[in-house]
Amino acid sequence: MNTSVEVQVLQWFERALAQKPEHRRAWLDGQELDPPIRDRVLRLLDADRASAGFPEETVVAPEEAPAEFPKVGERLGPWELLKPLEAGGMGVVYLGRRADDAYDQQVAIKLVRPVHLLAAADFRRQLISRFEEERNILARMSHPNVARILDGGSTSGGIPYLVMEFVDGVPLTDYCRQNKLDLRGRLVLFGKVCDGVQEAHRHLIVHRDLKPDNILVGANGEPRLLDFGIAKILEAEPLDTGGKRQTSLSAMTPAYASPEQVRQQRLTTSSDVYSLGVMLYQLIAGVRPYELGGLRPSEAEHVVCETLPDPMRKMLDKAVLTDAERRQRRAQITPDIERIVAKAMHKESARRYGSAQELADDIRRYLAGLPVQAHPDSTAYRVRKFVRRNRWGVLAASLALVAVLASAGVAFWQAGEARRAESDANRINKFLTGILTYSDPYVSGGEMTLAEAVDSSLATVDAFFADRPDLLYRIRQTLGSTLLGRGRTAEARELLELALKDAVAIAGKDSMPVMEIRQALVQVLSAEQRTGEAVDAMEALRSDMRLAGLEQSDLYFTVLANLGELKLGQDDHEAAAALFAEARAMPAEILEMVPANTMAVLVSNEAYVAYNRGRYEEAEALFDQADAMHRRVHPAGSPDLWILQSNRAFMLDEMGRQQEALALREAVLEEQRRQLGPDHPFLLKTMSSLALGALQQGDLETATKHMRATVELSRAEQPQPSPDTVIYEGMLARILRDAGELEAAEDTLAQAEARLAGLEPVPEELARMISIQRSHICARARALDLPRCAGVPPPPND
């Protein structure tokens, strides 16, 4: 017998069994199969149909069962086979009883499905190995919501069997329907299902075939998790060259399988969480999120991996319910319920619940009237990306200006003739002295910060350097970068564009000064949330530097590193990783010119890439490396180190270590206040991160406190329209909405909308985020008849 062909036959047979009985032949006709395989599968289907209902002793036609297969009435050790109960893809289950008079007990006895025992020897060995593994798996667990193993062995003919606790119950969905459970009752029951799955996960076991038929609910209302036939103990498994499992046995029910399982990629407990999400969707909406019947495997893979299910409220129209039941169920589907299901079913495994226990905890929080941990993809994810990092424009304006102007004087002295350089340095020092004089209260008439003195100097810089355009464009470049650091993007762009025009005229379009100014202008685009334009501009700069022969420079390193950061902002982690690797591979003499802190930022970004790929151990090692590099340069802390710690806090959140994340953010905020004072703009990112972390833990009071402080500081530091302030106001409106303060939420959002309208241009993603917030607030506040809610459409189901 050809083992390879037989394996294919049995795999297609299992797939056909997953279709509705009336559709199986038509489905099989639509597959691209060799005629001998198709004919063999049809014969198996005919045999299976002939045995439907278990009218006799076996679950297949007699000619399809080997002679050594046990019959009803026979004994397996102390157990007697009474009658067949059900047949699955690989196994058949009989009702049995204790027959040695030791005690009276009914049990479920599972054997390999007899039709599969006709396969080649290699395939039979795989089946036996699977049964032995299932026996080992069940022996590790003891939980009221998991069916217990009682015994196991092999028949005299070498056919393995398992003896399990007999669960006299019905499948999960049938139980809920027969008992007319409302949504609350279904959620309570489902929480217990999650408890059973968590018991498996606690033993590092992935079930891999969670579906309602594998969860029976007894008359006492207790669910039991069954059928660990394709479960797997988490351990390294070999992958083929395409990154897929080397497996010969089909190991899933596609309608409930996760995207990574459909693609035959490495599985984790998160794969079971996805299957739980599908079941929860079905329990609530009355139908599964996807119907895969009649689809080819490639089509089913596309549906599961690439498409989003319809909202549960809409899918209720397809459910077999009375109109009264449908209305009641629709009224019970709240935004929090939608969020819980969406998080459990997220296509990206790293963004699902970290465990079945986390899913159960969120369901119980909802039932207790507490805020849930799940958050809409359209809000929290964008907020996380925004807060993630923005290393441009983070240094104090006064220190940056003094340092850059002073270093510029030294550079000019080294670059030109001594007499001219000395004159240039004297002029720059005179300008710098004038700025410092402006900040003298006896001159200004009152206390003036150095930043305010810099602002006063903007009106005089053109006249001061009117006869020296070669110095003027450099001063404009420095002042523009300083204004960018303070969030004044429009003024920064104006100065930098003037500097660029003069630099092109004086130094030439392919000169290093021109490339430096262009790089600063890209930073302005990024600060204005115009990421797509920033990427295009940075890629053009990279190309022009290559054409001009300037790629062997530390500026080219900076361009690669910053372009990688922009790619991170677009979630293009592969491109970012390639750019970081290219920067690291530059010649040693160039890398020696790169400041240690800049190199540490690159390592930190590599850690962020690893974190987003779900490689948490690798990410933690890189974060540790970057942290040490930063502290060697700035032992007391620095802005880039704080950004690293913020990124690490986000990773801890996703790893389920929220308390560690919160403690890390609090320590960063304390360090920032100690070094920068209580009102420095750099505190904004940390305070907003703290607010978001508190929100994720359901602490609305703490979240509101930190976000109010963030908004107040952002408004004070950036009185002109700023994308950052709009985002913070949108976040505060969302928190206030969750806290039930709808009027305050609406007022805050109205201010964000007014500020958004003043931006030039208006960032599309930011406008969409604010629009979604408006829809959510108005959906909650219809009873208040708020004037700005007239005509606002309902929120999307994100």
Image (cartoon, rainbow, N blue to C red):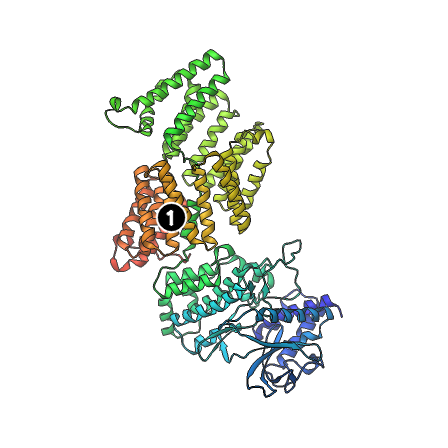
Query: Between residues 100 and 613, which one lies in front from this camera angle?
Result: 100
Q: Can see residue 202?
A: yes
Horizontal side, residue 344 vs residue 466: left or right? right
| Residue that extends furthest to the left in the rendered view of this protein | 445
* Tag 1 secondary structure: helix
Indicate the position of residue 507 as horizontal and vertical percent values: 49, 21
Indicate the position of residue 686 as horizontal and vertical percent values: 39, 44
Picture quadrant where residue 18 is located: bottom right
Horizontal side, residue 108 vs residue 521: left or right? right
Q: Quadrant of the N terminus?
A: bottom right
Q: Quadrant of the C terminus?
A: bottom left
Indicate the position of residue 610 as horizontal and vertical percent values: 54, 47
Amino acid type assigned to the residue bearing label 1 in the image = Leu
- Which residue is painted at 49% across and 45% down in the image? 570
Query: Between residues 180 and 80, which one lies in front from this camera angle?
Result: 80
Q: Which residue, given by chain and number where applicable, does mark 1 sit on?
A: 690
Picture quadrant where residue 389 is located: top left
How many numbered discs sit on the rendered protein? 1
| Residue that extends furthest to the top in the rendered view of this protein | 419
Q: Can see residue 348?
A: no
Indicate the position of residue 544 as horizontal and vertical percent values: 54, 30
Task: Reply above or below: 442 against 536.
Answer: above
Task: Reply above or below: 715 against 109.
Answer: above
Task: Reply above or below: 757 against 615.
Answer: above
Horizontal side, residue 686 vs residue 747: left or right? right
| Circle 1 Cα neighbour tier, 10 Å, few/some/many (<14 / 14–19 / ≥20) | many
